[in-house]
């Protein structure tokens, strides 16, 4: 008789998750938090409904692989190259600062230097799975804070390799030379896998797609996902990060959208198992044994990481809103820290009971992250009312003389992405004067190279609006990707120029009413524009056969 215990456990997990998440949805609690609570209820700490935690953890690992592969499909290698500043500068500042602060706190608590360094490594890592899932669900991966968060997360995950290689040295069981040699070998393996995958995966999918068999194409996508993930583990990286890199490779091919379509249902189901498994790991007994210590660790993690990520964004001269939202997104310790803690098992790097207490605090920090993401816009709005903080955090803005006192009748374009670039091209062709403001330095660099007048600045800042002479402008084009930032921009513009015409762009129809209600004169919905164009293309295509007859 076969043992189908894992099927029973999955049925229990899905049943509890459906009830809990659906119930919490009425209270507007994010789904990820609901999944984690479902795991707490179904796990050994409360109802004891799930018997085989090991099998559930294996399925959760598969779910994380699919989750990060799917997110990688949304972030191509070309896009990662455009995020190099966020990855290199933002990531190095955040990881270095977090490690240094945690090192100082651990030393002052009486831990050894090796233990302090290791705890710095553990706390420097944020949750790639939770943050990217949350940002993707909110449509904020392309927002300024989303790009910075993605860059920092990529750097953090790449740091896991040298952190793991340093464990024997920190515990006194290895030599520095051996660690450096292993690190060099890991980099060589990673580079070889990525180059090979970039050459092989698109060709493999081309051959499979040529058969016109959808089931075979699905198998090809899974081969690209798990094959790349497994190959990357040879460099010491986790399966999840390997899957993320594999997804970015597929994203660079023409098969990206079909791969996303085929992967989505299974990805959503199994990735939910991962978040449920996080809740099952929560040791309620440890909370009861030392609630004060766990609460202290949780506060240090959330407040400390929020402040350090905030300062990282501030050092990069990003606006206050971006600093707050990025801090709220990354104010937790992530799942890759479990890998580090597991690798340090058997050493004295994390003495007990600190190890158990830290594990509980890490899980709790991940559990509250969806709530922090949802509360981020309110936190940013509250911070913007603190005039002292605004003065300390103001971005580089155009000098008044750079714009010119006589400038009038111009158009201000806020955001120089694809939409902003097209608007600029049309205005230039028609001879309409315009200038561009953006908080992405790379976009400003592109605009200047194209010969446009462009400034680095935040359109929600009153100082910036005054410098670009918004009161004398013919109109403002809001081509930003963040609907909440667009709303704040409209409010700021209406305070300085009540009569200027505002044309806003948004991705979804649901945001149109909100923008109009705040004072936008016209809202162009990308979703509706695509639907209209699709209808026109269909009509033309259907008329062509009759014309030929």
Image (cartoon, rainbow, N blue to C red):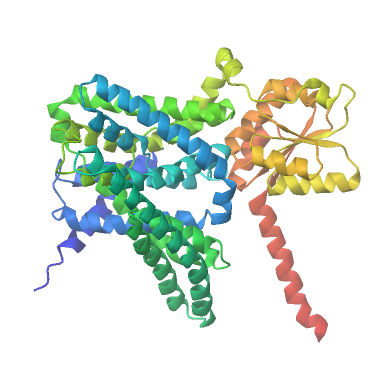
Q: Can residue 20 be seen?
A: no
Residue at left offset 71%, top offset 61%: 533
Query: Is residue 210 positioned above or below 136 on the image?
Result: below
Residue at left offset 41%, top offset 54%: 187
Q: Can residue 340 be seen?
A: yes
Query: Is residue 375 positioned above or below 277 on the image?
Result: above
- Residue 444 in percent (x, y) is at 70, 38
Q: Quadrant of residue 535?
A: bottom right
Asked whether 436 or 42 is in front, the reply is 436
Query: Is residue 531 positioned above or below 412 on the image?
Result: below
Asked whether 149 or 261 is in front, the reply is 149
- Residue 88 in percent (x, y) is at 51, 41
Q: Relative to residue 327, is residue 503 drawn left or right?
A: right
Residue at left offset 43%, top offset 77%: 215
Which residue in the rendered view is the most extreme toward the front? 177
Residue at left offset 52%, top offset 53%: 75
Query: Is residue 343 positioned above or below 1 on the image?
Result: above
- Residue 268 in percent (x, y) is at 39, 56
**Numbered-mark total:** 0
Image quadrant for the N terminus? bottom left
Which residue in the rendered view is the most extreme toward the left? 1
Asked whether 272 or 532 is in front, the reply is 272
Q: Relative to residue 106, is residue 76 drawn left or right?
A: right
């Amino acid at each position: 008789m076969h043992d189908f215990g894992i099927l029973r456990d999955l049925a229990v997990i899905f049943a509890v998750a459906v009830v809990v998440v659906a119930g919490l949805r009425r209270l507007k609690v994010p789904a990820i938090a609901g999944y984690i609570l479902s795991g707490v209820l179904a796990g050994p700490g409360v109802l004891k409904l799930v018997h085989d935690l090991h099998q559930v953890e294996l399925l959760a690992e598969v779910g994380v692989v699919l989750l990060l592969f799917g997110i990688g499909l949304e972030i191509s290698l070309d896009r990662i190259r455009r995020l190099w500043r966020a990855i290199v500068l933002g990531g190095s500042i955040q990881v270095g600062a977090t490690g240094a602060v945690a090192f100082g706190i651990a030393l002052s608590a009486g831990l050894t230097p090796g233990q302090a360094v290791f705890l710095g490594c553990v706390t420097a890592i944020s949750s790639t799975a939770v943050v990217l899932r949350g940002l993707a669900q909110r449509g904020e991966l392309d927002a300024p804070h989303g790009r910075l968060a993605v860059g920092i997360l990529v750097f953090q995950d790449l740091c896991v390799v040298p952190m793991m290689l340093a464990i024997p040295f920190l515990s006194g069981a290895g030599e520095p030379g051996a660690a450096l040699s292993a690190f060099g070998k890991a980099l060589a393996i990673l580079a070889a896998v990525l180059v090979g995958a970039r050459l092989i995966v698109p060709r493999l999918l081309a051959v499979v797609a040529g058969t016109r068999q959808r089931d075979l194409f699905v198998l090809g996508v899974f081969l690209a996902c798990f094959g790349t993930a497994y190959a990357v583990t040879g460099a010491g990286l986790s399966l999840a990060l390997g899957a993320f890199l594999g997804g970015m490779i597929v994203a660079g091919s023409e098969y990206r959208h079909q791969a996303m379509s085929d992967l989505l249902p299974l990805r959503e189901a199994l990735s939910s198992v991962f978040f449920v498994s996080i809740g099952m790991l929560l040791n309620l007994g440890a909370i009861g044994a030392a609630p004060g210590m766990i609460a202290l660790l949780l506060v240090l993690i959330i407040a400390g990481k929020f402040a350090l990520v905030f300062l990282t964004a501030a050092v990069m001269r990003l606006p206050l809103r971006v600093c707050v939202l990025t801090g709220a997104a990354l104010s937790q310790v992530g799942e890759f820290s479990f890998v580090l803690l597991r690798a340090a098992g058997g050493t004295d790097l994390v003495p007990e009971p600190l190890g158990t207490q830290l594990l509980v605090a890490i899980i709790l920090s991940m559990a509250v992250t969806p709530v922090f993401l949802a509360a981020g816009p309110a936190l940013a709005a509250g911070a913007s009312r603190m005039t002292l903080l605004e003065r300390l955090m103001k971005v580089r803005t155009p000098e008044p003389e750079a714009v010119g006192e006589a400038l009038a009748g111009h158009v201000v374009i806020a955001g120089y992405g694809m939409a902003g670039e097209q608007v600029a091209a049309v205005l230039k062709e028609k001879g309409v004067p315009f200038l561009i403001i953006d908080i992405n330095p790379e976009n400003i660099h592109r605009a200047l190279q194209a010969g446009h007048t462009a400034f680095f600045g935040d359109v929600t800042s009153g100082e910036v609006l005054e410098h670009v002479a918004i009161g004398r402008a013919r109109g403002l084009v809001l081509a930003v990707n963040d609907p909440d930032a667009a709303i704040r921009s409209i409010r700021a513009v209406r305070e300085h120029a009540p009569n200027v015409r505002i044309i806003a762009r948004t991705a979804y129809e649901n945001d149109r009413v909100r923008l109009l209600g705040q004072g936008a004169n016209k809202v162009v919905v990308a979703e509706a524009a695509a639907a209209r164009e699709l209808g026109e293309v269909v009509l033309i295509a259907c008329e062509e056969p009759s014309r030929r007859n």
